[in-house]
Image (cartoon, rainbow, N blue to C red):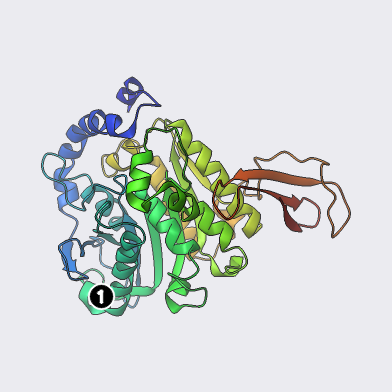
Amino acid sequence: MDQLLNIGVDMPLRQTAEPTIKIFLPLLEKHRTLIAAVPKKTLKYGETERHCLDVYYPPTPALPGSKTPILFWFYGGGFITGSRNLPPPADLLYSCVGAFFAQRGFITIIPDYRLAPEFQYPKPVEDVLGAIEWVVSHPTNIVSETTPNPDTDTLILAGHSAGASIAATIIVHPTLLPPDSELRKKIKCVFLMSGPYQYLTGIGETDRFTAYWGSEERARDQSALSLLFSSLDKLPKEKLPKICIVEGEREPLWFGRVRVDFRRLLEWHLGEGVPMFLASGHNHISLTCSMSTGEGEEWGVQVVEWIWGVLRGQGISEVTPGADPMEDVKESEAYECPNCHKRRTRSFTIEFGSISVSARTFIRCVGCGHKWTQD
């Protein structure tokens, strides 16, 4: 982990990937036997070679009569690269993720999806959603000796980088996953890792955004942040799963900027804190490389604890302390609450820069919880 300090924080992601992976390859190789020992099966959920998924099973048999929750994990790659199985010597990179969560009691599924620029938004999102729907409608296909009862009513979604954007899009999009759909009810929680939830210019990665969305205008209008804003009236908080955010301590600064806006808007809408786990010492790439190596896995252990807490029905404050909404925003007397007429509010402004809305200020009363917006 200490070697990561030699890799610049604000280097373009495509320049940090190779040196980061080189650091972790020996650690992954050291644990190859442990990772490979996790039962794994490959299935096809659609028509093309990109419509395949790998299923990782808990090595320990489930208790008699119990059901095993299903965790879907979506890899990143800037929307234009990525595969659930990479060639040697990096062939353990995503198997290590599947093995990590399978060893902790989840049937873990990693699907491929079609890539930009050949397949632009929303095709990759539709692919991933198709994988989820296929698994739910074919439970017998994912039965194993250790998991005779897959729990298709208890789904967890997770994604890293571009995969986090895809996962976020699924839960905030009002038509791809309608508010009252049965599938939405089955998704109990989501954890998002270092996702590009908003389009920003001048960050050195804009070509990937335009490759995926087709244009800057579409990238602004169809980002997870903009979709969340446009869905506020259509998706009451009861229709959203529990959400937490993971981020590396050494991420490029722009990831922090988009995460702050996305998390604040979620908390403003939900009226409760969205837990965030800061992975100490990690950069953007190392978050996934470290899984199943025994080094730098603390964030994963914390997230697993959070997931099980959610599934067991614990309150958010029991799972993660300090979970008040918008706690990173200072109180002020700038606005008077139209409901209780007190001047104790927290507010923030988001620059959307889209065709439909350029900017909006979001205000929440600390006293009564009433919330409103202002142009």
x, y percent for residue 135: 28, 73
Q: Secondary structure at mark 1?
A: loop
x, y percent for residue 240: 53, 65
For the point 18% across and 48% down, which residue is it? Answer: 34
For the point 23% across and 68% down, which residue is it? Answer: 146
Residue 137 visible here: yes
Task: Answer with the quarter of the image where residue 113 lies.
Answer: bottom left
Q: Name above or below for residue 315 compared with residue 343.
A: below
x, y percent for residue 88: 10, 42
For the point 32% across and 75% down, which residue is it? Answer: 136
| Relative depth, front residue between 155 and 99 | 155
x, y percent for residue 128: 32, 63
Q: Amino acid at mark 1?
A: Pro
Callout 1 crowding tier (Cα within 10 Å): few <14, some 14–19, many ≥20: some
For the point 42% across and 33% down, which residue is it? Answer: 203
- For disc 1, the marked residue is 148
| Relative depth, front residue between 155 and 211 | 211
Q: Residue furthest right?
A: 341
Image quadrant in which the N terminus is located:
top left
172 relative to 19 in the view: left or right: right
2 relative to 186 in the view: left or right: left
Residue 143 visible here: no
Counting the numbered discs, the total is 1
Q: Name above or below for residue 244 compared with residue 175.
A: above
Q: Residue furthest top?
A: 6
| Relative depth, front residue between 59 and 40 | 40
| Relative depth, front residue between 226 and 309 | 226
